[in-house]
Image: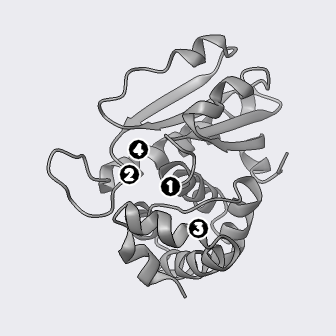
Amino acid sequence: PVTLMQSLSISTLTICGIEELPAHSIRRVTHVLSVLDPDLPEIDTFGTYGEHHRVTLRFHDIIDPAAGKIHPEPRHVEQILQFGESLRDGLAERVEGHLLVHCHMGISRSTAAMLTLMAQNDAVADEDELFERLRGVRPQAWPNSVMIGFADAQLGRGGRLVEALRRHYGRQLELQPQFTDWMTRLGRGRELEMAI
């Protein structure tokens, strides 16, 4: 387990996709942030989890507006930060926590959400270090750039999170060249162009 959010008394962080959720039911998850497509039915796997606090957000994993799709908006990132505040508020009530953040594949929306929570919780942490921690939790992380842009603004990071995201993309393309083909097919070429 990666120990990152001690000040939140969250000792374990997990990022995953929907298919991986059943495997985590035995791992004493205390907090869940679900980021789902708006038309996806409620996930029944959580019935097998113990008692936990869960917040669900619904929007599509896109970076450009598309007909019939719900684009990530500033309010979604505000809700992620409110969730982060609730983690902090519950600090006195628990010994340790296990935060699980998931989206459909556990690659884009969930990794952007987790990076946002990490940056919120560790205001003095270097941005590149935050992305390094993120890769430690989820090596295939490709955070949604629109969400990171909103997080940068709302956390007052002055563009540094977005710059670090560009370096992160560049590193991911070196380590996992399949991202080039994948993101091209998903219409995320703008993120490939961001990579440095």
Q: CA distance from mark 3 to mark 4?
A: 32 Å
Name which of mark 2 and mark 3 comes first in the sequence: 2
Task: Provide the residue designation for mark 2.
Answer: 61
Q: Amino acid at mark 1?
A: Ser
Residue 6 x %, y %: 79, 48
- Determine whether label 2 and label 3 are within 8 Å by CB: no
**Looking at the image, is mark 2 or mark 3 nearer the viewer?**
3
- Determine whether label 1 and label 2 are within 8 Å by CB: yes
Residue drawn at the location 33% of the way across and 46% of the way down: 60
**Outermost residue to the left:** 67
Q: Nearer the viewer, residue 122 or 151?
A: 151
Task: Provide the residue designation for mark 4.
Answer: 79
- Tell me if 37 is positioned left or right of 97 in this view: left
**Looking at the image, is mark 1 or mark 3 nearer the viewer?**
3
Task: Work out whether 99 lies above or below 64.
Answer: above
Circle 2 SS class: loop
Check the picture and name the quadrant holding the C terminus. bottom right
Task: Provide the residue designation for mark 1.
Answer: 108
Name which of mark 1 and mark 2 comes first in the sequence: 2
Location of residue 64 by image quarter: bottom left
Location of residue 66 by image quarter: bottom left
Name which of mark 3 and mark 4 comes first in the sequence: 4
Q: Which mark is residue 178?
A: 3
Residue drawn at the location 33% of the way across and 43% of the way down: 59
Name which of mark 4 and mark 1 comes first in the sequence: 4
Circle 4 SS class: helix
Circle 1 SS class: loop
Q: CA distance from mark 1 to mark 3?
A: 15 Å
Location of residue 50 by image quarter: top right
